Amino acid sequence: MATNTTRKILILGSGMVAPACIEYLSRHPGNQITIVSSAQTLAAGFPRASAIALDVASEAALEQHVASHDVVISLIPYTHHPAVIRAAIKGSTQVVTTSYVSDAIRALDNSAKTAGITVLNEVGVDPGVDHLYAVKKIDGIHAQGGKVRKFYSYCGGIPAPECADNPLGFKFSWSPRGALLSQRNSARFLKDGEVQEISSHDLMATATPYHVMDGYGFVAYPNRDSVSFQQFYRIPETHTVVRGSLRYKGNPAFVQALAKLGWLEQDKKAWLKDGMTWAEIQQIAIGVSVTDESCLVSRIKQVVQFPNEAESDRIIADKATVVSGNLLDTLCTRLEKLMSFRSGQRDLVMLQHKFVVEWANGNIETFTSTLELLGEPNRYSAMALSVGVTCGIATQLLMDGHPAVCKPGVLAPYTKEICDPIRELLEQEGVVMVEKRVG
């Protein structure tokens, strides 16, 4: 372990949100930052930062590097988090992730407590910033004798409207694979006192128009398990709890089309070879016996069942190009080239909570809490800032020994004690949700 004046931080993952996190942590002169990255240039841009190569699949190498640091920030895919946490338990190293607490992470709670380490999760934007302001408002309502009867929370990491210039209405400020697969989750939520469930195959079909503020044309759909947040947010009185995602109109139909055409399949296809044309791949994927384009288009329309002819023509016009591997990775490689942000373009993080409140006198009022955060083309994207800085702040609080976050075991920001110090520092970085009464 490091001395009191030097804190050694290991960052796993050097993707799009990492620089904002690194920049925040590099402001503190006691921090020495090691970045697992093949790009030495990333570390070169920050003081007291260096880069190393590390195969996180190598248990021995992972344990060695984790044990030599005070804290490890895992920004790699969530499936790797349990292995990172197990290494941290062995090395008595603190852990921070921006991901949801999965069952696999929760199962390590007792081991983390025994080791005396904190495993702090859900400190990004969604999850993360959403918790900070949901807990603040709910606690305030309860303190005034009110009851939260309905709670809605929707978030979207999307292009600014002027940059949504492709059929998906989307550009990738993080992993294309992760972004697409997030739209293939199942959903479970509470509505009017009843638990509702939607399968991953049907999720995109449930997207409906949702007004956040004037000037935007969003659709919204539920995501993951919202029911648990009735307990996490301590609102047993509520009848409705829905957490979900925002996209521009047309995006869910496009993703549904890709799924029905086989492009989101993750298993390897023996028949998929480099050099195959789009028509050849699609012929096999949807089971047609001809390669004539008009016949393929006809079969695609049968499979997908588009809402109208104009929508079918718009969606079919965007054809993927084969690179290698399975269909999903082939698609993602192509989309990353076609649908990444170009120089000067900016993204948007839109996050809104809606609270329907019943007061002690029987009056009903509705409140919103809204984050409209636009990226800065010459600095950070909105996604990078809101995820990376939130993660950096939480990590620094942990390194500084803040009592709210320095508790052994698996934690997430569901209490005032954890949320308040993170939120207060985050607002200084320009990430603020604005509260309003709307009815």
Image (tube, rainbow, N blue to C red):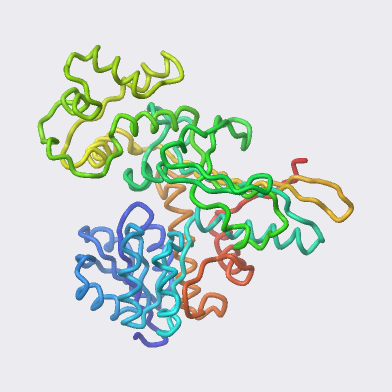
Which quadrant is the N terminus positioned in?
bottom left
User: Is 159 placed above or below 308 here?
Assistant: below
**Image position of 94 (left or right of 322):** right
Which quadrant is the C terminus positioned in?
top right
Image spot of residue 360 (x, y percent): 86, 56
Work out which residue is located at the far right of the displayed protein and give it: 361
Image spot of residue 331 (x, y percent): 26, 36
Number of marks: 0
**Image position of 71 (left or right of 238):** left
Work out which residue is located at the far bottom of the displayed protein and give it: 3
Q: Nearer the viewer, residue 400 or 292?
A: 292
Residue 308 image-quadrant placement: top left
Residue drawn where x is 45% and y is 39% of the image? 158
Residue 54 image-quadrant placement: bottom left
User: Is 420 placed above or below 171 here?
Assistant: below
Q: Nearer the viewer, residue 103 or 32?
A: 103
Residue drawn where x is 39% and y is 33% of the image? 255
Image spot of residue 291 (x, y percent): 16, 17
User: Is 278 placed above or below 85 here?
Assistant: above
Residue drawn where x is 33% and y is 75% of the image? 86
Q: Nearer the viewer, residue 176 or 342?
A: 176
